[in-house]
Every structure is written in C-alpha cells, then in structure tokens.
Image: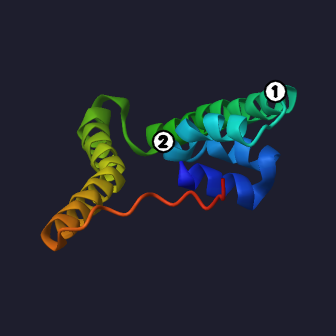
C-alpha cells in the first residue's frame, strides 16, 4: 500500500494510474489508494482505460515482434527445446521478489521476537 501511495504522490494521479499497470504489486493497491486520495471517478476511469490499452497493446506487440524474431532464429520444430527452459527461467525470476519479501518479513519478525519487542507498525507517511 505504501508503494502504491509513493507512486501516486511522486507522479500525480494520471501518470500513477497509467504506470501502475506496469508495476505488479502497485497495480493491485493503486485502486484503493486512488479512492482514499479522492481521485474523481471520471478521471480515474479515463486514465485506467489509457493504462489498460497501453499495457494490453504493448504486451501484444512485444509478443508479436519477439515471436517473429524467435521464428527467424529457431526452426518451429525445435522451438520447445528453447521455449520451455526460458519459461522456467522467467517464472523463477518472477518469484525472486516474493521470496525476498517473505525472507525480510520473517527476519524482521524473528528479530523482534528475540528482542521481545512488538514489530513496528507500517508507516503510511500520512498524518491522520
């Protein structure tokens, strides 16, 4: 939630809503942050649609051109020999940030348990 709010404050509502489409964790939490920060529904809707179009078309075009390049380099009957290991590597790389975050959280919890202190609350950067 803090990361989403940071992106929102850093780039402003329009850019943050569009950029959130490209940042996996921020994408999930930006909608509630936009509501809390009282972004008008029409403005949010417009920039959400722009972000969706850019994200979808960008992924489709990247996939098309990447596939075109791969087909030029690798014969179609041998594609599985290269694509399947590449998919495994991509999945493993995608899991690294999650593993790091789980490790940090557990380390912090153990550190506080050993010291006998409660974990620090997550700072939102806002004063209520």
Q: Residue at x 76, y 28 (%)?
A: 49
Give the answer, above or below, for where 101 lies relative to 40.
below
Residue at the disc numbered 2: 72
Nearer the observer: mark 1 or 2; the answer is: 1
Where residue 95 sits in the image (x, y, percent)? 30, 48
Label 2 secondary element: helix
**In the figure, residue 104 lies in which quadrant?**
bottom left
- Place of residue 34 in the rendered image (x, y in percent of width and height, measured from the top left): 71, 39
**Neighbours of disc 1 within 10 Å: few (<14), some (14-19), many (20+):** few
Tell me, for residue 64, which label it has, or none.
Answer: none
- Which residue is nearer to you in this view: 77 or 42? 42
Q: Is residue 28 above or below residue 112?
A: above
Q: Which of the two labelled residues, at mark 1 and mark 2, occupies the earlier sequence position?
A: 1
Q: Is residue 72 shown left or right of residue 94?
A: right
Q: Secondary structure at mark 1?
A: helix
Residue 96, picture quadrant: bottom left
What mark, if any, has residue 41 been given in the picture? 1
Q: Is residue 1 left or right of residue 118?
A: right
**Residue 78, image x, y percentages:** 28, 35
Report how many numbered discs are placed on residues in the image.
2
In this picture, residue 115 sits left or right of residue 121: left
Q: Residue furthest left?
A: 114
Residue at x-position 43% and y-position 46%? 73
Percent x, y of residue 28: 53, 37
- What is the quadrant of residue 118 in the picture? bottom left
In depth, the one of 73 and 123 nearer the eye is: 123
What residue lies at 56% left-to-right and 55% top-to-bottom?
A: 3
Which residue is drawn at the image coordinates 79% and 46% (left, top)? 13
């Amino acid at each position: 939630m803090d990361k989403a709010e940071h992106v929102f404050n850093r780039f402003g509502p329009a850019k943050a809503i569009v950029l959130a489409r490209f940042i996996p964790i921020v994408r999930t939490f930006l909608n509630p942050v936009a509501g809390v920060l009282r972004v008008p529904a029409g403005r949010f809707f417009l920039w959400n649609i722009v972000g969706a179009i850019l994200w979808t078309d960008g992924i489709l075009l990247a996939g098309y051109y990447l596939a075109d390049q791969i087909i030029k380099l690798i014969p179609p009957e041998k594609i599985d020999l290269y694509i399947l290991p590449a998919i495994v590597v991509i999945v493993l790389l995608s899991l690294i940030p999650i593993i790091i975050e789980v490790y940090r959280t557990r380390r912090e919890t153990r550190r506080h348990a050993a010291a006998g202190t409660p974990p620090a609350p997550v700072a939102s950067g806002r004063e209520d």
